[in-house]
Amino acid sequence: MQATDVRVINNYSEGEVIKDMFEIKRANEILLSENDVTQDVLDKLEKGEEPKATIPAKGVTEYPILKFDDRALTLLHMGVSNTLKYTQVKPKGGKGFEFVKRAFDIVASAGALTVLAVPMGIFALIIYLDDKGNPFFSQVRLTKDGKPFKMYKLRSMCIDAEAKFAEVQKKNKSDGLAFKADDDPRITRIGRFIRKTSIDELPQFFNVLKGDMSIIGPRPPLPREVVLYTPEQMDRLLVKGGLSCICQTEGRSDMEFDKWVEGDVKYIKTRSAGLDLKLMFKTAAAVLLRKGAK
């Protein structure tokens, strides 16, 4: 058995690292950070053995790339799109299903925004009065084929939360690539309430109306997470991202990352108008019961 070809990623600040990462993934090579190259790893490689995965079981506490400019996002989009060409997962539902799904998204999101306009306005005012900052927050996320878009939220964190992420990433309590921390110091007083009640997610109905998202679909991930995805994990980007999916109805923050991915892929393989309707009702119940919300 031949030893595996290993490249060491040294420069985390340049967009080229993204291209290198995806070239390595497609070649079934092993992605190692500089700190991962220990003598034990080198010994195993020399013997032709595969070292263990570099993503720690308890979750990522230091993301390789935190800032993504337009060029980096383009590279990431291309990397995801090219990788998905080799997937064995086939999304269920043809053009008819897609037409009905989009029509429903437009009607449902327009109706939701009409009904929720006043409550959103009230909470936006409360957030503004709390620290005089913009009550709305936008963040780049990825949807189908890794396409980037700006996802809207009611701001639940301090104004400079993104700039402070580098300081808090070591507090990650999740078991995978997503960041979750019970004691995140960036969350504001009102922020804790609107996160637990999912009120902070309401502006995403604008994303649904625009066509960036769907009512039901895998939750759109952050670029810093996707750049670390395995090809199998990228399967969750085969369809348009949504407000809710299987994971959000069965535990949300309490669910293991691998189970989260499995749930998204299961949805992609079995999606239908009936399943979407079922998940919408289950989502409403999960929100009311605050199941897994943090």
Image (cartoon, rainbow, N blue to C red):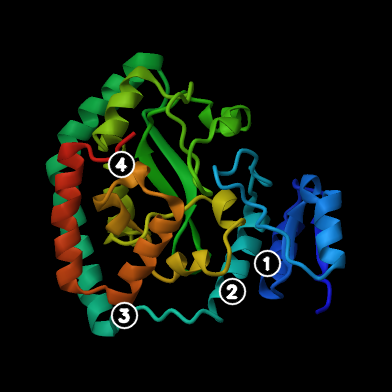
Type of the residue with mark 3:
Lys
SS type, badge 1: helix
Which badge, 1 or 2, comes first in the chain's sequence? 1
Q: What is the CA distance from the residue labelled 2 to the residue labelled 4?
A: 30 Å
Left/right placement of residue 220 relative to residue 43 reads: left
Classify mark 2: residues with Cα within 10 Å, few (<14), some (14-19) or many (20+). many
Q: Calculate the distance from the C-alpha at mark 1 to the C-alpha at mark 2.
A: 8 Å
Q: Mark 3 vs mark 4: which is more N-terminal?
A: 3
Question: Which residue carries the number 2 mark?
Answer: 83
> SS class of the residue under badge 4?
helix
Give the CA separation, mark 3 to mark 4: 27 Å
Mark 3, residue position: 92
Query: Which residue in the structure is indicated by mark 4?
Result: 201
Q: Are discs 3 and 2 less than 8 Å apart at CB?
A: no
| Comes first in the chain, label 4 or label 1 | 1
Looking at the image, residue 204 lies above or below residue 212:
above
Q: Is residue 136 left or right of residue 44?
A: left
Q: Distance between the residues labelled 4 and 1?
A: 31 Å
Q: Which amino acid does label 1 sit on?
A: Phe
Residue positioned 80% across, 79% down in the render: 1
Nearer mark to the viewer, of 2 and 4: 2
Residue 174 image point, x, y percent? 48, 41
124 vs 229, nearest the viewer: 229
Where is the C terminus found, in terms of image quarters?
top left
Q: Quadrant of residue 231?
A: bottom right
> What secondary structure is found at the residue carrying circle 3?
loop
Residue 172 pos. (x, y %): 53, 35
Foreground pick, 252 / 119: 252
Q: In the image, residue 253 lies at what x, y percent? A: 36, 42
Q: Which mark is residue 71?
A: none
